[in-house]
Image (cartoon, rainbow, N blue to C red):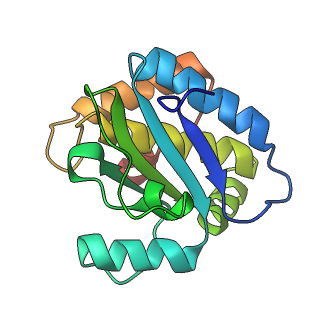
Amino acid sequence: MPPEGTTVTFRRPAAGVRPRALARFARRLQSEVAGGRAFDCLITGDVELRRLNREFRGKDYATDVLSFRANRSLTVAAQKRDATEPRPSGSGMYLGDIAISIQRARAQGRKFGHGTEHEIRILMLHGLLHLLGMDHESDRGEMARAELRWRTKLGLRNGLIERVSA
């Protein structure tokens, strides 16, 4: 894959999750949702999500998904490549980084009646919408509508925003 392509990296192998299928889904998101702009997705654990959430958001707890836009990108992509600098955004073709907790995805998948892989897809879409500049905490429902529209098109159920709103 060219350097500008979307990547999905697992810190550790995850039972019941097909990395190639998630990579294909990420490329579909890149093509259809992100207008060809790439992003990197790191599938890791609660410990790392908690550290990132504390370090970059000042919130000392693990969460299911975090997004870091390229123009404010931290070093999620750099960490997984053992580099010292974030991936350059170039001509705006690189959106940023998404980090997902495999433990949260597994637990939420069980809670909402679907598998871990399906939940990772939901979290990846949600994170990507944040990379595109949407913010459900302040946008008067714009992100919720976009998430519902894309979830329907992509065959995903139980979006994050509607879970909180219900």
Q: Residue at x 67, y 35 (%)?
A: 23
Question: Does residue 112 appear left or right of residue 164 in this picture?
Answer: right
Q: Inspect this view and state whether residue 157 appears.
A: yes
Q: Residue at x 32, y 42 (%)?
A: 88
Q: Quadrant of residue 51?
A: bottom left
Q: Position of residue 35 (x, y in %)?
A: 38, 16
Going by the picture, which residue comes out furthest to the right? 16
Question: Does residue 71 appear left or right of residue 38 in this picture?
Answer: left
Going by the picture, which residue comes out furthest to the bottom? 60
Q: Residue at x 14, y 46 (%)?
A: 138
* Residue closest to the eye, 100 or 70: 70
Report the label total: 0
Q: Inspect this view and state whether residue 158 appears.
A: no
Q: Quadrant of residue 60?
A: bottom left
Q: Position of residue 112 (x, y in %)?
A: 65, 51
* Residue closest to the eye, 103 or 140: 103
Q: Residue at x 53, y 33 (%)?
A: 6
Q: Position of residue 38 (x, y in %)?
A: 44, 30
* Residue closest to the eye, 150 or 100: 100
Q: Position of residue 89 (x, y in %)?
A: 30, 37
Quadrant of the frame with the N terminus = top right
Q: Judge whether 81 appears above or below 33 on screen.
A: below
